[in-house]
Image (cartoon, helix red, strand yellow):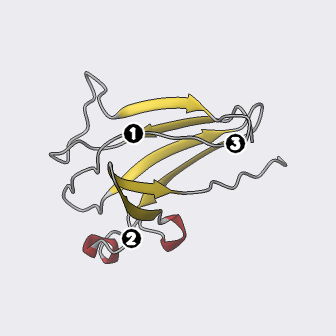
Amino acid sequence: MARALVDLWHADENGEYDNSGFRYRGHLLTDAAGRYRFRTIVPALYPGRTRHYHFKVQAPEQALLTTQLYFPDEPANRRDVLFRRDLVMRVAEAPEGLKARFDFVLNMRW
């Protein structure tokens, strides 16, 4: 979906959210092929949660999807009551660090 708004936020390297300077937050519109790309860090763990990214995705004039994406093979996945296996990103090593991929599927009927 072209021009879908993708909003990302997550904890920092200490497991804290920056609610004053708003670091580790960003948004963009998908390209003509529906692709999006963020460059960021792997967030640290914080008490009670596994490692994750928060996302909001909204196609033009459609309902808003709010969700979280998770890392594979995280020991804390088993203990996090919000964890969902279907929201695990595909993660691979890359020359510049890790690369993660997740294809959002939006309900365009509402």
- The answer for how far apart the CA atoms under marks 2 and 3 are is 24 Å
- Give x and y (percent) for residue 99: 41, 55
Closer to the eye: label 2 or 3? 3
Reading the image, the residue beneath label 1 is 39
Residue placed under numbered mark 3 in the picture = 34
Classify mark 2: helix, strand or loop. Answer: loop
Residue type at mark 2 is Pro
Sequence order check, earlier mark of 2 and 1: 1
Residue behind mark 2: 72
Give the structural element (helix, strand or loop) at label 3: loop
Which residue occupies the foreground of this view, 19 or 3? Answer: 3
Residue occupying the point 51% across, 64% down: 87
Residue type pointed to by label 1: Arg
Looking at the rendering, in which quadrant would you find the N terminus? top right
Q: Amino acid under label 3? A: Gly
Query: In screen coordinates, is 48 left or right of 108?
Result: left
Q: Look at 50% across and 45% down and name the residue there.
A: 55
